[in-house]
Image (cartoon, rainbow, N blue to C red):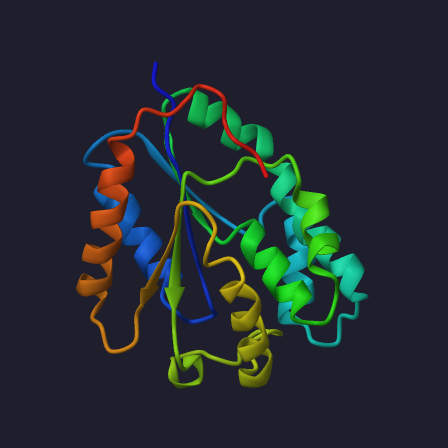
């Protein structure tokens, strides 16, 4: 059995990741088995702690502690991701390792230190980065801890350093309809699905 594809959707806050991952999953369901995994996964034991940290601005953690929690949350689901891919399930990720590195490095921590805890995690077969020039005008912006324009600008600068990664695709979403962005995403994913992947799942 051919393994499934690991498809990652990344982007700045309020860039439309949730909408686009939902649309993508609906499209993939017409082809075969697919699963959507959102990070942080707030349903796991570690994820519940992360949720408290994100929504309660009085909840204080050191930057290092917070980063390691986010990484641990990804490791909680690593075996699930591997087993489902091996079973031929396509997996769509809403945020992943790149977000972890970008958001923490934007606080001033060393980028390599930020990546180190994630070394060994499954690596996406394709990454779709939703690039938004101005998130502050989007509905709901500012509801969570990291949704501050100045900080988002720093996060974007960190993401820019990933743009030369293999299988990385940047899509500018400003001024485009949901359908237009979805069409761009599908054009890329459709090509990826035609790839014959090696049984061994690549890792970071």
* Image quadrant where one finds the C terminus: top right
Instruction: Identify which residue, 112 or 76, lies in the foreground.
Output: 112
The image position of residue 195, as x and y in percent, is 29, 30
Is residue 41 at all visible to an observer of this figure? no
Q: Position of residue 65 (x, y in %)?
A: 79, 58
- Seen at 46% across and 55% down, the residue is 164
- The image quarter containing residue 129 is bottom left
The reply, left or right, for residue 109 in relation to residue 40 is: right
Q: Look at 41% across and 20% down and name the residue there.
A: 87
Vertical placement of 84 versus 167: above or below?
above
Q: Is residue 161 above or below residue 137?
A: above
- Pick the residue in front: 185 or 89: 185
Please indicate, yes or no, whether residue 52 appears anywhere in the rendered image: yes
User: Is 101 rendered above or below residue 27?
Assistant: below
Residue 122: image quadrant is: top right
Q: Nearer the viewer, residue 22 or 126?
A: 126
Relative image position of residue 98 (x, y in whole percent): 55, 54
The residue shown at (44%, 78%) is 140
| Vertical comparison of 180 with 47: above or below | below
Residue 68 placement (x, y as % from top left): 74, 52
Looking at this view, name the residue that lies furthest to the front.
164
Q: Which quadrant is home to the N terminus?
A: top left
């Amino acid at each position: 059995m051919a393994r499934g594809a690991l498809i990652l959707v990344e982007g700045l806050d309020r860039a439309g990741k949730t909408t686009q991952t939902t649309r993508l999953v609906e499209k993939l369901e017409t082809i075969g088995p697919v699963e959507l995994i959102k990070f942080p996964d707030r349903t796991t034991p570690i994820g519940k702690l992360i949720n408290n940290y994100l929504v309660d601005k009085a909840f204080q953690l050191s930057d290092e502690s917070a980063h390691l929690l986010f990484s641990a949350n990804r490791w909680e689901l690593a075996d699930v991701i591997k087993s489902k891919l091996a079973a031929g399930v396509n997996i769509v990720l809403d945020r992943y390792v790149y977000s972890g590195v970008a958001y923490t490095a934007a606080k001033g921590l060393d980028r390599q230190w930020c990546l180190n805890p994630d070394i060994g995690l499954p690596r996406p077969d394709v990454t779709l980065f939703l690039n938004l020039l101005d998130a502050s005008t989007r509905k709901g912006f500012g509801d969570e801890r990291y949704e501050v324009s100045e900080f988002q600008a720093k996060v974007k600068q960190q993401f820019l350093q990933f743009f030369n990664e293999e299988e990385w695709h940047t899509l500018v979403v400003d001024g485009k309809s949901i359908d237009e962005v979805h069409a761009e995403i599908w054009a890329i994913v459709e090509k990826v699905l035609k790839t014959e992947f090696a049984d061994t799942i690549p890792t970071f």
